[in-house]
Image (cartoon, rainbow, N blue to C red):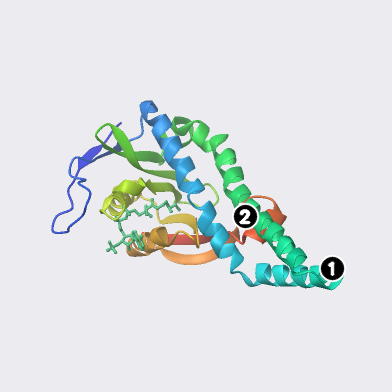
């Protein structure tokens, strides 16, 4: 079954025209666009994650301790700078690995077969927004089996060119309509502290923060990158 809805954002000025955009269920022809968007949205987080990681107290302490040890041993400012540069690169590499590992994990699991994971199971769905034959936004919803009548929202992405045009909100409205239609009592999702736009969007759509969990991956990499998942939920 495929549902379609078109929309325009009335009364607001935006550089981008989304009036010809269609929100519909995922089809196999969307696969390459969806995977490209999924991959790019995560790669875009590497540099912001690195900037944030450099400001975290644990990494500042690590840089200071290593710099001090290097100075005590060598009495050389050059050596201190070299040690700090190497450490900063290690932190950058950890941030990169967090996202590269996550992308690989997802591309080999649920994103490897979107129909199987999001369209076939009852109470699940994957939406795309299309403009001029191109996928410009995605959202996925899965039934969760840990708690009754609970679903998990995931893969909410809008193409950077179409952001701040109301498309994210429209995708969320489509998803929320589906959730209510399917009688779910709770919807959960997670995002990272870096994703400020997403956090604001979720709050605006009635979600509230309800905890923090570790990002999946190597403990050392997570410690250096300081990337954690913020959990959100909304009750219906
Ligand atoms: C989060 C995202 C989907 C929002 O899509 P969007 O189309 O830009 O959002 P909208 O234009 O519908 O804006 C809806 C609300 O989101 C929030 N928001 C959107 N962009 C924002 C930004 N850059 N900074 C702060 N808040 C922002 C605002 O609260 C906004 O409401 P307002 O316009 O009344 O201020 C989009 O920014 C995105 O794809 N980000 C990267 C991927 C991502 O982080 N996805 C979440 C995965 S968990």
Quadrant of the rendering where the C terminus is positioned? bottom left
Compared to 228, does 67 lie above or below?
A: below
Q: Is residue 70 visible?
A: yes
Mark nearest the camera among 2 and 1 is 1
The span from disc 2 to disc 1 (Cα, nearest Å) is: 25 Å
Mark 2 vs mark 1: which is more N-terminal? 1
Task: Please state the horizontal and vertical placement of residue 117, each as a whole percent of the image.
Answer: 48, 35
Q: As rendered, which of 190 and 234 lies closer to the eye?
A: 190
Q: In the shown orientation, is residue 119 left or right of residue 230? A: left
Query: Where in the figure is residue 147, as x and y percent of width and height?
Result: 52, 53
Give the residue pinned by disc 2. 92
Count all numbered tags in the image, as a single digit. 2
Q: Position of residue 39 (x, y in %)?
A: 49, 41
Kindly state the secondary structure of the residue where label 2 is placed. helix
Q: Quadrant of ligand 1?
A: bottom left
Q: Does 21 sit left or right of 44 as displayed? A: left
Residue at the spot 79% in from the left edge and 69% down from the top edge: 76
191 vs 98, left or right, is: left
Q: Quick one: label 1, few (<14), some, or many (20+) residues within 10 Å?
A: few
Q: Residue furthest left?
A: 11
Residue 177: give x, y in percent of width and height: 29, 49
Q: Which residue is mark 1?
A: 74
Depth order, front residue of 182/25? 25
Q: Secondary structure at mark 1?
A: helix
Give me the residue at 26% from left, 54% from top. Answer: 166
């Amino acid at each position: 079954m495929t549902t379609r809805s078109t929309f325009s954002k009335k009364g607001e000025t935006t550089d981008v025209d989304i009036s010809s955009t269609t929100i519909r269920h995922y089809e196999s022809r969307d696969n390459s666009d969806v995977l490209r968007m999924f991959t790019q949205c995560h790669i875009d987080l590497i540099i912001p994650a690195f900037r944030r990681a450099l400001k975290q107290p644990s990494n500042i302490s690590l840089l200071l301790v290593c710099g001090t040890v290097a100075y005590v041993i060598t009495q050389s400012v050059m050596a201190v700078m070299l040690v700090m540069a190497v450490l900063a690169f290690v932190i950058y590499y950890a941030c990169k690995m967090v996202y590269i590992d996550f992308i690989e994990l997802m591309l080999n699991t649920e994103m490897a077969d979107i129909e199987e994971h999001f369209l076939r199971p009852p109470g699940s769905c994957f939406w795309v927004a299309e403009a001029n034959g191109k996928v410009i936004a995605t959202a996925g919803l899965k039934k969760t089996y840990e708690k009754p009548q609970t679903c998990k929202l995931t893969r909410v992405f809008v193409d950077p060119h179409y952001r701040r045009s109301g498309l994210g909100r429209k995708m969320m409205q489509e998803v929320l309509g589906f959730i209510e239609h399917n009688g779910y009592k709770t919807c959960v999702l997670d995002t990272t502290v870096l994703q400020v736009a997403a956090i604001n969007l979720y709050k605006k759509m009635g979600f509230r923060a309800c905890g923090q969990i570790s990002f999946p991956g190597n403990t050392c990499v997570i410690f250096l990158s300081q990337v954690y998942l913020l959990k959100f939920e909304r009750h219906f």
